[in-house]
Every structure is written in structure tokens, then in C-alpha cells.
Image: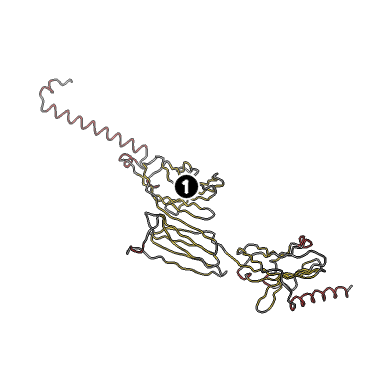
Amino acid sequence: MAWGLVSMTLRGLMLMVILLWTVTSTDGGDVHVTCVFSEDCVLPCSFQPDSEEVIHWLKPEDKNLSTIHSYYYSTDQLKQQSQPYRGRTALFNDQIPKGNASLLLRGITLQDQGRYKCYTSTIKGNKESCVNIAVEAPVRLVDIQLSDDIITCSSTGIYPEPKLTWSTDPPSDLSFDPGTIQNSTSIKVDDRGLYDITSTKQFSRDRTNICTVTSGTVERTATLKQQDPVQGPPSSEVSILCSVSQSDLLTFDLTWRFNLTDTILTSSYTNGTPQMQVDDQWKEQVQSLSDSGSLQLHKLTMVHQGTYSCELSTARDTHLILTYLQITPDKLSDVSDGLSPGAITGIAAAIIAAAIIAAAVICFRLRAFCPQCRSNTVI
């Protein structure tokens, strides 16, 4: 029994030695795979199925071959596995008898990039193939903000190094405007090796401001525009539009804010059906939300005058639309706004009393200068 165990161990070591020092012919060219940062990735490898399968996944590093995953004697053999890959690899064991030697690599990092060798062997012979991994952390979200007429556009956690460009709709040539603040862009690398990018520019009020971030084959866009102001008297119904050029939107997230900070409501649209959640402080004012995302308000007072922002996010784009709401009360509303019913009644009584006194004074003066009036006075 002991000799059998030693024999199996020696055979495994011999297989590794043969693999390390023998160059076998590859089956075709390298396979190229793009993996997404922090997600799982499958490295494909196949062979002609037969008995006594042996599988070794290796990676050349610093003139040596690191063992990524090994399989023989019908089980995983991980004692020689390289430290960075421990707990992160798996074969599809139920598929091995069918000739599938593909490797599942979990939690992809930038250090996983490079060329991997897949060595397979059965009683019929052996085969070696190679897989090249490229890692991407695609642009997922572009954030756009406005403060003091300066737009800030940013995106984080990107690889490879991104590019950021500004444009407007309709297009404009700002090179001849001496008052224009030049674009300022900065790129930083975080502790994971991913890129953060930030850029600022002066806000073009009469156009849609467009910020585009590109990395690899992935492109994401954020837009910001200011609509014409909306006016309305207190207690009236007011509709604030949230319109974008894409009229066929069915799935998106929507957030309405007041003065760019206070959240009014959030809503998720799935196939055109919204699921809305209104902040407690705005439940009395929010009347409805249209299918396109426009906001219907009522029971407004002067405290609700300000900038309303609609942020609409899809899988590719983010749109920020600003609208200033001006409350335009009449004179009576100005006087009575904020007064209690008792105070209003008191003011009305005082006005009536003043009118009676004024009428009495006028009548007395008429009697003093009109003898006929005195003689006709009824006592």
C-alpha cells in the first residue's frame, strides 16, 4: 500500500518534470480572452477525451512556471499551487471526461494578465495550448455636477487608462471666447492599479454640455443642460419636464433633487413601468410622475422656489437636466402668506371698522356745511 502511494507521487512529480522541461507542439494559435476586473473568468481548454486524464495550468513568471491548477488521479492536486491563486481556481470536473479542461479563475485582478499554458494528457497522448488574458475595468458610470458655473465630470475604477472629452449640442467653438475657462483634466491611479479621471469646464448655459469617457472599447457619456425657467403661483399645479433626446427609453433610473442636494424622489423604470419612492418631506407636494419622468407638483409655497434637477441614468448614459422654478404670488397672497385664520379675521374687522369711521366723519362734515342736511336730519 505504501509503495503504491509512493509510486503515485513519483508519477505525479515525473509528469511535472516532463512538463517543465519538454516543449510540446501547440494546437493552433493562442486563444485571447478579455476578463472583467473583480469578476470571474473562464480560460478555455479542450482535449480528446480518454482515460487517465492529467491537466496542468501554468503561467510563465520571472523565467519560471507558476502552477495555477493541477489535476490527476481523478482529483484536484493543489499542494504545488502558486500562492496568489489559492482559493481562486476550479475546473469543471464533471466535464473533464468529455474533454473539457477549462479553468475558472475567480476575482480577476490586474496581476492575472498574461499568457497561460494548458497542458493535458491521456493514454492517447498529450496536448499543450495557450490562453492570453487581458483585463479590463470598463467605464460603468460617469458623474456630472454643477457648482458656481463650473461643471465637473468624473469616473473611477477604470482600466486601461481612460480618455475624457468635452463637447456641446449644438456644437460650439470656444477657442475664440477670451472669458472661457480652459478644461482641466487629472488622472490618478488607486491602490488596485485602476484609474480615476476628473475634468472641469465652464458651464455653457445655452447648450447641452456633454462629457464622454472612453476606455478600451467601452464608452460612457454624461450630459448636463439647463431648461427655461418655470413659473407658477402658490398652491397651483406645476409640471417640470425631464426630457432627453432618447424617446424610446424603457429601462432607466431617475432621481429628482431640489437645489442639487435634497432628494425629492427616486424611481426605477423597467420596461416603462416605474417604481417610485418619495421622500417624506415632499409627499405633500409631489402629485404624480409621468411615464417620461416629468414631475407634477402642487401645494407650493415660497420655500419651494429654486432649482429642480432631474438625473436620468441608463446602462450607457447619464443625463442631468436643471430647471429653475419661480413662485409668483399676487399681492393678496404676499400679505396673507403665512398668516393664521384668526389674524386674517382680525385684519378684516379692522378694515371694516376703519371704513365705518371714515363714513361717519364724511357725513358729519357734510352736515356742517349744508343747512338743508341739518334740517332734514332725523332724530
Q: Position of residue 263 (x, y in %)?
A: 47, 51
Between 307 and 246, the one lying in front of the other is 246
The correct choice, above or below, for 142 with respect to 293 in the image is below
Q: Where is residue 80 in the image (x, y as percent from the top left)?
A: 74, 74
Query: Which quadrant of the figure has residue 91?
Result: bottom right
The correct choice, above or below, for 244 with respect to 33 in the image is above
Q: Residues within 10 Å of mark 1 (few under 14, many from 20)?
A: few
Between 153 and 103, the one lying in front of the other is 103
Query: Which quadrant of the figure has residue 35?
Result: bottom right
Q: Mark 1 points at which residue?
A: 281
For the view shown, which residue lies furthest in the front direction? 28
> Does residue 22 appear left or right of residue 106 in this picture?
right
> Does residue 67 appear left or right of residue 265 in this picture?
right
Q: Position of residue 218 (x, y in %)?
A: 54, 61
Q: In which quarter of the image is the C terminus?
A: top left
| Residue located at (52% from left, 51% from top) | 253
Q: Position of residue 285 (x, y in %)?
A: 45, 43
> Does residue 341 appear left or right of residue 275 in this picture?
left
Dot 1: element: helix
**Label 1 sits on what residue type?**
Gln
The correct choice, above or below, for 202 with respect to 289 in the image is below
Between 51 and 201, the one lying in front of the other is 51
Q: Quadrant of the N terminus?
A: bottom right
Between 162 and 352, the one lying in front of the other is 162
